[in-house]
Image (tube, rainbow, N blue to C red):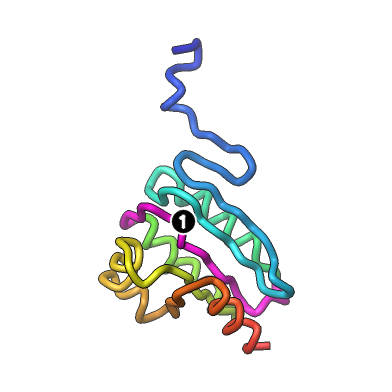
Amino acid sequence: MDAEGPAWEKPRYMNGMTGLVQVVERHDGTVPVCELKGELDASNVEHVLERLTSCVGNDAPGLALDLAATSYLDSAGVRILFELARRLRARRQELRIAVPNSGIVRRVLVLTALGDIVPLDDNVDASVAALRARV
């Protein structure tokens, strides 16, 4: 423990990483793609929402959100995905989520009815292709 307290109490902000999640941003042509690696929970959702919102320009058809490497998603994480979808819809953009068919994250999205509002694709290529078709 150092003078500022134990390391586990300090938020980590490095290259899009905060706490237990890393946001990896790229563009596939005109489509922004953000990959979440790790755990999305109450400790990091506000930072993640800010990062995801900022990576979508006004001219983009929407956002392809890749959750293939997301290992955990709590209710706060689900809440910000609903909020992100709402913000994009208000800008006439679409959120598409790429998440493998099997796995706990997909089950959470289906059980919370997010899958009824946001299209869930099996992979990020399908999300990108659907967003490109909007243009």
Per the image, the residue denoted by label 1 is 69
Which of the image's four quarters has the N terminus?
A: top left
Q: Quadrant of residue 15?
A: top right
Query: Regarding mark 1 in the picture, which secondary structure is present there?
Result: loop
Identified at 57% across, 84% down, the residue is 130
Magenta-colored stretch includes residue 71: yes
- Range shown magenta: 58-75
Q: Nearer the viewer, residue 67 or 5?
A: 67
Of 56 and 128, nearer the camera is 128
Snapshot quadrant of residue 133: bottom right
Residue 74: give x, y in percent of width and height. Answer: 32, 54
Q: Nearer the viewer, residue 21 or 83?
A: 21
Q: Position of residue 111 (x, y in %)?
A: 26, 71
Say above or below: 68 vs 12: below
Is 66 inside the magenta-drawn segment? yes
Relative to 2, say whether 110 is above or below.
Answer: below
